[in-house]
Image (spheres, rainbow, N blue to C red):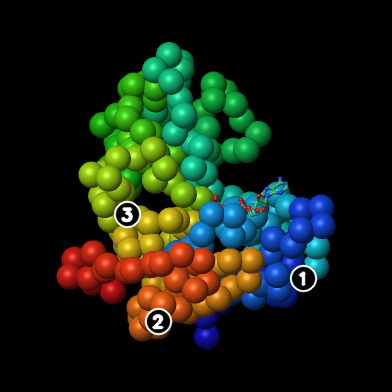
């Protein structure tokens, strides 16, 4: 039986009086890679904020790693990367290593003192995302795509079991998006880290993800990737609200 690391049961949420999430059921198991897709304004970020405990549902319950979110004590098991992470300018006075180390504790600032062991953890984490050789460079000197890899290393440094990302490829050029997603695939496949990824790049991601959830206020589909692929483009277009035609770009490259 799969152990659920996220379980949303009948979750609804409203900002003021407008319902944004309507009776959501969603279960994410250990080691699964979920793509959360849906049109603009469909509630994806709101749902992520509820899973992260930043917003409280109007009704329904949220469990993380088998505990009710209100009594969940192991935040370090969850790494989070937002779409706004890659925004350091070239003058920002911190090295890549310092940024990654700062992920080791929520209480520390960028410049508190760290042990040799902390540094090794940070270097290991940078190695996972292929950025070890940039460790001593200033974060602001890196490209948007490289910065985003560093932020994933920061989210990984505490060795989380779950990585949540909200449109992490915003600002990354198309050439680097594919290698970015391949890296996520390796994180999931080789390191066993469960991933929940919010994205608009449905063709790229739904070939990599093991599971897909389609959200537009309510969940229109959630299940394994092969079942998602069997759905008609017309069905997806109907709940998306505009025509969607899928092209499966990674089919021959990814061994699922
Ligand atoms: N703080 C807020 N106060 C009021 N309404 C909000 C707030 N944040 C979001 N909304 C509204 O809630 C709805 C869902 O927004 P949300 O950001 O969750 O959607 P999304 O699917 O992540 O969108 P996008 O793909 O454009 O990032 C939208 O109609 C949005 O305008």
17 relative position to 233: left or right: right
Q: Name the element at disc 3.
A: helix
Residue 172 coordinates in the image, percent (x, y): 34, 40
Residue 66 seen anywhere in this rendered image of the structure? no
Query: Can you say which quadrant of the picture contains the C terminus?
Result: bottom left
Name the image quarter holding residue 171: top left
- Could you give the CA–CA distance between mark 3 and mark 2, rounded to whole angstroms? 23 Å
Residue name at image x 70 percent, y 70 percent: 22
Residue name at image x 44 percent, y 34 percent: 86
**Crowding at label 1, few (<14), some or many (≥20) Cα neighbours within 10 Å?**
some
* Tag of residue 173: none
Kindly give the residue lying farthest to the left in the view shown. Answer: 252
86 relative position to 113: left or right: left
Q: Name the element at disc 1.
A: strand
Depth order, front residue of 28/189: 28
Kindly give the residue lying farthest to the front in the view shown. Answer: 242
Does label 1 or label 2 sit earlier along the sequence?
Answer: 1
Disc 2: which residue = 231
Q: Name the element at disc 2.
A: loop
- Could you give the CA–CA distance between mark 1 and mark 2, rounded to whole angstroms? 29 Å
The image shows residue 156, relative to residue 146, as above or below, that is: below
Residue 141 coordinates in the image, percent (x, y): 34, 21
Does label 3 or label 2 sit earlier along the sequence?
Answer: 3
228 relative position to 104: left or right: left
* Tag of residue 60: 1
Residue 34 coordinates in the image, percent (x, y): 46, 66
Name the image quarter holding residue 107: top right
* Tag of residue 181: 3
Does label 3 or label 1 sit earlier along the sequence?
Answer: 1
């Amino acid at each position: 039986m799969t152990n659920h690391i996220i379980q949303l049961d009948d979750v609804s949420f409203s900002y003021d009086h407008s319902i944004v999430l309507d009776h959501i059921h969603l279960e994410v198991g250990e080691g699964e890679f979920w793509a959360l897709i849906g049109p603009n304004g469909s509630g994806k970020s709101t749902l992520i904020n509820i899973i992260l405990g930043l917003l409280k549902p109007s009704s329904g319950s949220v469990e993380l790693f088998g505990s009710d979110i209100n009594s969940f004590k192991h935040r370090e098991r969850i790494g989070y990367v937002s779409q706004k992470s890659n925004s350091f300018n070239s003058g920002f006075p911190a090295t890549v290593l310092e940024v990654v180390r700062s992920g080791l504790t929520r209480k520390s600032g960028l410049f508190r003192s760290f042990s040799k062991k902390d540094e090794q953890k940070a270097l290991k984490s940078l190695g996972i995302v292929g950025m070890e050789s940039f460790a001593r460079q200033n974060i602001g000197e890196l490209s948007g795509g490289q910065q985003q890899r560093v932020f994933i290393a920061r989210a990984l440094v505490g060795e989380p079991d779950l990585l949540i990302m909200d449109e992490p490829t915003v600002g990354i050029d198309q050439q680097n998006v594919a290698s970015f997603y391949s890296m996520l695939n390796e994180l999931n496949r080789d390191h066993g880290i469960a991933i929940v990824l919010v994205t608009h790049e449905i063709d790229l991601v739904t070939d990599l993800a093991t599971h897909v959830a389609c959200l537009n206020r309510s969940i229109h589909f959630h299940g394994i990737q092969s079942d998602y692929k069997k759905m008609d483009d017309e069905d997806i277009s109907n709940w998306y609200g505009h025509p969607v035609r899928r092209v499966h770009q990674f089919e021959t490259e990814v061994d699922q």
